[in-house]
Image (cartoon, rainbow, N blue to C red):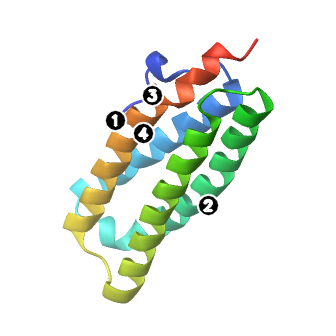
Amino acid sequence: MKWEPRFATGDAKIDDQHRMLFTASEQFRHTLEAGEGKKTYDLFLDFLTSYCEMHFAVEENCMFMHKCPVATQNKHEHGLFLRLVDKENVRFRDEGFDAALATKLLDTLDHWLESHICRIDTRLNEVLV
């Protein structure tokens, strides 16, 4: 999945961070398709965890600072997504790499990105001046 202008929030820093996540997801999908996912899944999960913690804090702060009407919903959805990532980290640590589950995580990530950004994050456009 690639970043598109319809995902723009009006905040350059947030949009750049979103682009970074789209790129990482796309690159890891290529890695999986090449049969090399086992070698780098731990790195992808580490990146995803760190990215979410950093990006969600930046985005939530921006929304609250600008009194975005969906700031609370945004924070709630971020929490749900972080729990999903944490759950996959635990599963991976306990059970190891599973290509089908890694693909499922990427599919979930891509679907979540499109849905969340279009429904929630783009609402920043309403409040940024």
69 left or right, relative to 95: right
Residues at marks 2 and 1 touching, judged by CB atoms closer than 8 Å:
no
Q: Residue furthest left?
A: 100
Q: Which x, y percent locates residue 51? A: 60, 54
Local crowd at mark 4 within 10 Å, few (<14), some, or many (≥20)? Answer: some
Distance Cα–Cα, label 4 vs label 2: 16 Å
Q: Which tag, 3 or 2, sits closer to the chain's start? A: 2
Local crowd at mark 3 within 10 Å, few (<14), some, or many (≥20)? Answer: few
Residues at marks 1 and 4 touching, judged by CB atoms closer than 8 Å:
yes
Q: Residue furthest top?
A: 129
Kindly report which numbered mark, 3 or 4, lies closer to the viewer in this rendering: 3
Which residue is under mark 2? 50
Residues at marks 3 and 2 touching, judged by CB atoms closer than 8 Å:
no
Q: Check residue 113 in the rendering and tell me which mark sits there, or answer none.
A: 4
Front residue (pair 44, 116): 116
Q: Which x, y percent locates residue 49? A: 55, 62
Label 1 amino acid? Met
Q: In the figure, 50 relative to 5: above or below?
A: below
59 left or right, relative to 26: right
Distance Cα–Cα, label 1 vs label 4: 9 Å
Distance Cα–Cα, label 3 vs label 1: 17 Å
Which residue is under mark 3? 119
**Secondary structure beneath label 3:** helix
Residue at 55% across, 40% down = 73
**Secondary structure beneath label 4:** helix
Front residue (pair 53, 79): 79
Which residue is under mark 1? 1
Distance Cα–Cα, label 3 vs label 4: 10 Å
